[in-house]
Amino acid sequence: MKFIAERTGRHCLSLPSNRLGLYLALRHWCLPGQRLLMSPVSADEILFLVLAAGLQPVIAPLSARDGNIDVSLVDLDGVDAVLTTNLYGLPDRVSAFTGKILIEDVAHALESHVDGRPLGTFGQAGVFSLSKHAGAGSGGVLAVENASDMRALARARDELLTPGSLRADLMSVATSMARQVALRSDLVRPALALSRALGLHESREGYRIPLDPDGLREALKQAPALPPFDPWVRADLHDYRRHRGRLVRWYRSRRVARVPRTRARRLAGVRRLAELPTVAPAVRDHLDQPLFRVPLLVRDRDAAIAELERHGVATGYLYDPPYDDYAPAYAEASPHPGPARWWAGNVLPVDPLYAARALPVLRRLEPSEGPVSRSPA
């Protein structure tokens, strides 16, 4: 948390997950019934957090250049608030949302910036993840400008926390450490098989968890309230509201302290991957950003994923289909859905820390022909 506080210059609230932080921010700054503009391409649980907060999701057009909100096609007069995504660390055009309630999801963008200013400092709140760049397995930080907001958010957090235990903390740390060893030791395929066998990943229909419309209708009757939405929000992280003890806090601090040490390696990986013909165009505009993942846009993505696993490179963070195709009854559809469908169906996010291991596969991949974004460069 010290790293983020020093980087942002903001008051920071420690959390068991980024997910809890997003819900707290949405409930604190938005009123039930307000219209929230959001990207069509992000993690399953984000949509359900918006619904849990009692808000109306308004799905934005997506830029095919970077996978974020296409501001040139957005009617900001028709929404009350905006939730950015900063997909894979590529920054949203935050300056375009001035005058709106702005909640920044910076889970993928711990080290990203706009004109030298860190993401997470433009809106009312920036919500960080410690499980992405830091690889801590869990944990989040909510960064806000005013101390009075932080105190109110801390009280709301404490009301939603579930009891912790030493056993759960030991399991959390051991699982995260094992994941890091597997990545470094080229044990990705057995690690993935074991995690699936242990039920550490939710069952999915393609890349999305099953919607369960009947259960969701019952949960919506209780909004704004988070616990009824636990079956959806907790996907792949059942302890997202669990209180954590000293062991986990120590482990997270150790993992976060490593982030600056990997910056040069991450940047080098971004630059190597940016040379590929399949790279998303916006990556070449952000070679100074230590991206969480480098998005490629490829043909036959599933075959590429299988081949990468054989080379010891795991692929995750795939959000397909877009929200308005995944849950059309619960979100206002994008007026321009084509780019989001193409992006979600063809993007291949690659960890720049493992660029050298992945390149023998990636160099053989062909670009996916898709729509040309009308958003400015």
Image (cartoon, rainbow, N blue to C red):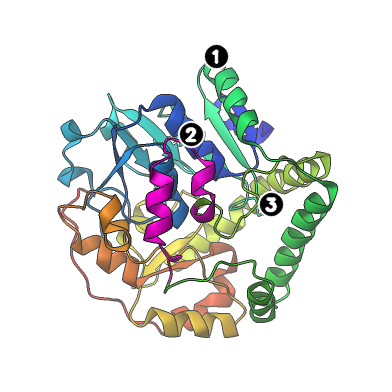
Nearest to N terminus: mark 2 or mark 3: 2
Q: Are marks 1 and 3 in contact (CB under 8 Å)?
A: no
Q: Are marks 1 and 2 in contact (CB under 8 Å)?
A: no
Residue on which the image places disc 2: 126
Q: Secondary structure at mark 3?
A: loop
The amino acid type found where label 3 is placed reads Ala
Q: Which residues are magenta?
A: 207-232
Q: Are marks 2 and 3 in contact (CB under 8 Å)?
A: no
Q: Secondary structure at mark 1?
A: helix
**Residue 178 point in image, percent of width and height:** 76, 66
Residue on which the image places disc 3: 136
The amino acid type found where label 2 is placed reads Gly
Q: Is residue 176 above or below residue 350?
A: above
Q: Residues within 10 Å of mark 3 (few under 14, many from 20)?
A: many
Nearest to N terminus: mark 1 or mark 3: 3
Residue at the image point whose x is 18% and y is 66% from the top: 371
Per the rendering, the mark at residue 236 is none
The N terminus, quarter of image: top right
Residue 65 visible in the displayed image: no
Q: Is residue 16 above or below residue 189?
A: above
Residue on which the image places disc 1: 148
Q: Is residue 223 magenta?
A: yes
Q: Quadrant of residue 159?
A: top right
Residue at the image point whose x is 41% and y is 64% from the top: 295
In this view, the residue in front, 22 or 106, is 22
Q: Is residue 216 magenta?
A: yes
Q: Secondary structure at mark 2?
A: strand
**Residue 118 point in image, percent of width and height:** 48, 35
Q: Residues within 10 Å of mark 1 (few under 14, many from 20)?
A: few
